[in-house]
Amino acid sequence: MDFVLATFNADKARELGALLAAPGRRLLRLSDFQGATAPEETGGSLLENARLKARAAARHTGLAAIADDTGLEVDALDGAPGHLAARFAGPEGDSAANLALLLERLRGVPAERRTARFRTVCVACFPDGRESVGEGALAGRIAAGPRGHGGFGYDPVFEVAGMGRTLAELDEAEKNALSHRARAVQALARQLP
């Protein structure tokens, strides 16, 4: 069965592709479809944003589509940036700006109060209107500064609980074995044909 990965983020598409690979399952990138665009993420939750992206991709391509939305919930910031993690520094901000703003907001907050979790919701929307959902979370804390060269987004400052290493310090296989996205995709994959 063919699925389109409803993202234009090359890092995320690569990660989703590795996690969803299975015999008889072909994974296509949304960027391979002429005229495809990303919908505005206007949802008030991770589920709503993932659903918006998956439904838009399914409508545009006529194929089953898989989308995810990930949020970073920092306890010292009352759960922020949450589902707005990708837009934390504003509409013109990028990953570097988001990371810089996060560290600025946490300046002076002691390590024991920098607890956080990544949360991911994956949605598969089928052309006939059916939908499947998988969720995953990963606990950790926000490090004082970036460490590591892998991953993307907030990975360089997200120290995995009990490991003492950031997601960016893990190799791809280690990250895919335990990440929030891996857990959400595994929960979703069990429901897919």
Image (cartoon, rainbow, N blue to C red):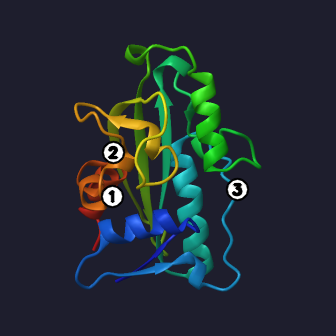
Residue type for callout 1: Val
Q: Residues within 10 Å of mark 1 (few under 14, many from 20)?
A: many
Q: Is residue 44 something one can see in this rendering? A: no
Q: Work out whether mark 1 precedes mark 2 in sequence or the reverse, and give the earlier one.
A: 2
Residues 130 and 138: in front is: 138
**Left or right: 170 in relation to 46:** left
Secondary structure beneath dot 2 equals strand
The residue that appears at 63% across and 26% down in the rendered structure is 104
Q: Work out whether mark 2 precedes mark 3 in sequence or the reverse, and give the earlier one.
A: 3
- Check contact, mark 1 vs mark 3: CB within 8 A: no
- Check contact, mark 1 vs mark 2: CB within 8 A: yes
Q: Is residue 1 above or below residue 150?
A: below
The location of residue 32, given as percent across then percent down, is 57, 84
Secondary structure beneath dot 3 equals loop
The location of residue 37, given as percent across then percent down, is 69, 71
The location of residue 125, given as percent across then percent down, is 46, 66
The quadrant the N terminus occupies is bottom left
Q: Is residue 188 above or below residue 27?
A: above
| Residue designated by label 2 | 136
Residue type for callout 3: Glu
- Determine the CA span between mark 1 and mark 2: 8 Å
Q: Residue furthest right?
A: 92
**Left or right: 20 in relation to 95:** left
Residues 182 and 103: in front is: 103
The residue that appears at 62% across and 36% down in the rendered structure is 100
| Residue designated by label 1 | 185
Q: Residues within 10 Å of mark 2 (few under 14, many from 20)?
A: many
